[in-house]
Amino acid sequence: MMALALIASATAFAGDSDALKAIKKAKTYAEAAQMIKTAQLANDEERAAAYNKLVDLAMDKVSKETGTMAENQAAAQLGTGKVSPVDTLGLADAICNAIDAAIECNKYDQLPNAKGKVKPQFAEKNAQRLWSIRAHLVNIGQDEAQKGNSAAVLKYWGAFLDSATDPLFASQNHEAEKGYIGQVAYYTGRYAFDAKDLDRANKYFDIAMQDPEQKKDALNFKIFAAGSNLKSKADSLQFIDQLKGLYANDPENDVILDKLFSMYDGLKDKAAQTALLDNHLAKYPNSFAALANKGMMAIAENNAEEGATWLRKAAVASPENPVIQTYLGTCLSVMAGASEDAAKRKELYREAIQALDKAKQLDPGKAQANWGYNRYQAYYGLYGADAPETKAAEADSH
């Protein structure tokens, strides 16, 4: 019994393994990281301790550079002119390394010990000391964005965003970041898209969509990104299913509706287009996207009268849209030219001119809609070739 007790005691109070001792003596992050790759550590507690050593070593670099930054700020305030260089990329890399090591440390730190109990040794300290320095990643990423260093921007902003939702930092105060995390997520999503990493792009767009100010832009780009790499009909059908899911969750979003409509158009599925718009308008009769697309379907079938019917409603739903005003005016002008009733013809030309004048007012440079020739035609039809109004419209048509 005494022998068994001595063995149990020796096991319970065994010191660090040789591998962990060697890691704890490492002087640099790189040295310790390399040792951990091949180390035969005794248990999860040792693994947690080893990764915590990595955090400490990374934080040595963080402390050095942030200390220099603080000294420079003090020098600027005192006007001493003593400014020392700061290794900003080294600082950002060290923060990323510290975060990665702390998260890995926490995985082992949260596991039950030999007695079956979870007693984290490092989580609270690591969470507190790392949470306070993460904002440097945003600032340094912004500096690298101005330099065109896209890879660095994605790395630093990605690390900032990824760590925000890690369990290690669940107890930290996230309120201060709510004012800007959506914007960071939106632009990080765009950098991830440029890097052809669509999974990360979608992840960051989803974060951005939680911010009301970023939701529309993030959703638009998420849809664009998802539809940018369609190589087959199967890809298109899969994308349509994704859009249907988005539409089911947000049926009043015209961006989703319009993209789903255009996907059906690409597949030449007129029946699906019609059903989509008719069902939508039954619930949302003032939906601009649905009304506009109904009008454009009619125009594609050379049905100016039906096109005008829908585009009149679309113009009411979105009166500041020069494209709709242009197509509406064109439909009305076509209807006027086909009318055998002189009074009706003049009425339609006047309505057409009103819409096309509105298009000119909204888009004088024709950047969105080329209203020029159709407007001239409407003036020509109402006033004749030699009228001053027609001449002025002709001059504007070029």
Image (cartoon, grey):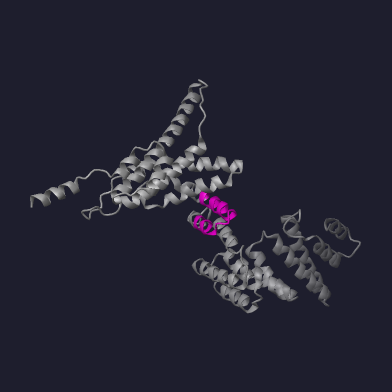
Residue sitting at 70 percent across and 64 percent down?
324
Look at the image and give the residue range highlighted in magenta: 183-204
Whether the magenta-drawn stretch holds residue 187 is answered as yes
- Quarter holding the C terminus is bottom right
Whether the magenta-drawn stretch holds residue 109 is answered as no
| Residue situated in front as seen by the camera: 26 or 302 | 26
Q: Is residue 313 above or below residue 78?
A: below
> In this rendering, would 111 be left or right of 175?
left
| Residue situated in front as seen by the camera: 334 or 38 | 38
Q: Main secondary structure of the magenta part?
A: helix
Residue sitting at 45 percent across and 33 percent down?
66
> In this rendering, would 53 be left or right of 325?
left
Q: Quadrant of residue 379?
A: bottom right
Q: Is residue 72 visible?
A: yes
Percent position of residue 249, x then y: 49, 67
Residue farthest to the top, as pictured? 80
Q: Quadrant of residue 234?
A: bottom right
Q: Is residue 152 above or below residue 323?
A: above
Percent position of residue 75, x then y: 48, 24
> In this rendering, would 226 be left or right of 96?
right
Residue farthest to the left, as pictured? 1
Percent position of residue 355, x then y: 74, 63
- Give the number of callouts: 0
Q: Is residue 174 visible?
A: no
Residue farthest to the right, as pictured? 386
Percent position of residue 129, x then y: 37, 40
| Residue situated in front as seen by the camera: 318 or 201 | 201
Q: Quadrant of residue 236?
A: bottom right
| Residue situated in front as seen by the camera: 274 or 354 | 274
